Amino acid sequence: MMDVFVEQIVQKRKGAKEWLIICGSMLAAAFLTFFFLFILPQFSAFVGGFSILLAAAAWYGAIWLSRSQSLEFEYAITNGDITVDKIIARSRRKRVVSFDAQYVERMGKYRPEEHAQKDYTKQLIVSDGVPGSEEWYMAFRHKSFGNTLMVFSPNERTLEAIKPFLPRQLAFEVFGKDAFHRP
């Protein structure tokens, strides 16, 4: 069998929560700037000298917080090892999860109602968040997280890379007889 290495980057769509954080941080920075430049100097001449620095720090924090709302997820499949990283503002990377495909117990197209009553220790939503897009799920036991549900947005190439490393019965249940077909 040939070595398999596939990467896919999925950009997460900003939802209401993210836009609220962005707008709130900008409004807070504007308020703090007004406070530091116009209100605070009236009470203390000593603090007045630092007011420009304090206002700049407020804007720096608001911009940093706003940029942090830009998320991407990178799926990497290397010979059955599945790794998901979160990329924040295209500058910071954080490992979300890493596991072997042979430990996947269930997989398929994601329907939230089917998982509402299931007891998962950890739920990882690492999909694009676009309404109507095709999301998939994997349920597996992770050494640190326990019973884990991962919701993701794989493309066809990513699914093809995962397929040969799934347990044989599961691959057949999910992909049918195409699970063992090699192009």
Image: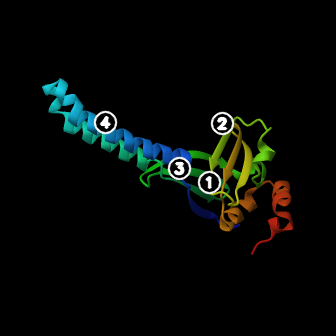
Q: What's the CA distance linking mark 3 and mark 1? A: 14 Å
Residue type, label 2: Phe
Helix, strand or loop for disc 4:
helix
Q: Could you tell which of marks 2 and 4 lies nearer the N-terminus?
A: 4
User: Outermost residue, bottom direction?
Assistant: 183
- Is the residue 12 above or below the residue 121 in the image? below
Helix, strand or loop for disc 2:
loop
- Where does the image place residue 60, in percent across and percent down from the top left? 31, 44
Q: Could you tell which of marks 4 and 3 lies nearer the N-terminus?
A: 4
In the drawing, what numbered circle is on residue 32?
4
Kindly check if marks 1 and 2 are in contact, taking CB atoms under 8 A apart as contact.
no
Q: Could you tell which of marks 3 and 1 lies nearer the N-terminus?
A: 3
Helix, strand or loop for disc 1:
loop
Helix, strand or loop for disc 3:
strand
Q: What's the CA distance linking mark 1 and mark 2? A: 23 Å
Q: Counting other residues with Cα less than 10 Å from the Cα at mark 3, is it few (<14), some (14-19), or many (20 or more)?
A: many
Residue type, label 4: Leu
